[in-house]
Image (cartoon, helix red, strand yellow):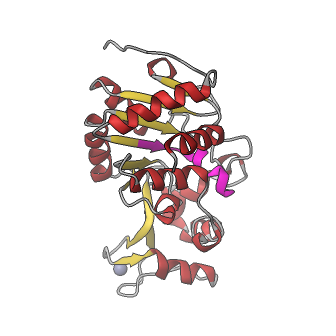
Amino acid sequence: MKFSPGRCFMDKNREDSIRELAFGLREASCCTAFTGAGVSTFSGIQDFRGKNGLYRQEKGEELFDLAVFNRDPGVYYRGAKDFIYNIEDKTPGIVHILLAKLEKAGLLNTVITQNIDLLHQRAGSSHVIEVHGSPLLHHCLKCGDESSYEDIAALVQRGKIPTCRKCGGSIKPDITFFGEALPVDAMEQAFEVAARSDWILVLGSSLVVQPAALIPLETVKKGGKMVIVNNMATPLDSCAWQRYSDLEAFCTMLSKVLEL
Ligand code: ZN
């Protein structure tokens, strides 16, 4: 495979390079954003793998472990109470807000996210593909009965562990746990959208979680341009058309240049 890596700006000449990007976005027929945990740190949500990330805390990994869930769903529901089931307490951050505005302005088609915090939807994005699953829906592991986020959140906030109203089985969120395959439909949709995008903005993802991280590469393989904004190096940096490290400065400048 042959890439044309283009230029790596690393925040130099930021305004000029962002003007160039803004021009490209206005001309684009399909633009996609691919987001990771870094976009939610502005909303006070821990980056799982960051320095103080959930996965580094005691029992953090167990929260999304299928074997642990099958033994005791309470481990997940108690841990997720003030992390997943408190959407009312969370505020979309600068990236969520910018992406919702870009969609409204007709400059962004789809958000593909590795996050499970529902903040893109809360900010107003209407085309969101959640490649690591979602807590929007829950299903009974025995009979498949479906429950909404709101119904489950109301129970969990009262300290209850939800069980199926029909058969008494365990109810699991549609989040992809360790030990489970990624959601096939969402992954197929994400690859299909990435393949027909002429731009993909990779925001706040270190692109280390596979196979989700291969999605932006699909755009590059099909001749589209990739812009990476992340505070740490990523394995795809050399394929990026532009590369920035400061997510907040990037969003502020892009909003200004596009007059959003
Ligand atoms: Zn059931």
Residue 230 lies, with reference to residue 125, above or below; the image says above
| Quarter of the N terminus within the rendering | top left
The residue at the point 50 percent across, 31 percent down is 19
The residue at the point 59 percent across, 34 percent down is 230
Q: Position of residue 92 (x, y in %)?
A: 58, 60
Residue 197 lies, with reference to residue 58, above or below; the image says above
Q: Position of residue 211 (x, y in %)?
A: 40, 36
Ligand 1 lies in quarter: bottom left
Q: Nearer the viewer, residue 145 or 188?
A: 188
Q: Position of residue 161 (x, y in %)?
A: 56, 79
- Compared across the picture, whether 177 is left or right of 94 comes to left
- For this orientation, the residue located farthest to the bottom is 165
Tell me, yes or no, if residue 45 can be seen here. Answer: no
- Compared across the picture, whether 210 is left or right of 234 comes to left
Q: Nearer the viewer, residue 70 or 154?
A: 154
Q: Position of residue 80 (x, y in %)?
A: 61, 66
Q: Is residue 39 magenta?
A: yes
Tell me, yes or no, if residue 228 can be seen here. Answer: yes
- Compared across the picture, whether 133 is left or right of 254 comes to left
Residue 70 lies, with reference to residue 161, above or below; the image says above
- Compared across the picture, whether 243 is left or right of 159 comes to left
Total labels drawn: 0
Q: Is residue 219 magenta?
A: no
The residue at the point 41 percent across, 49 percent down is 111
Q: Which residues are magenta?
A: 33-44
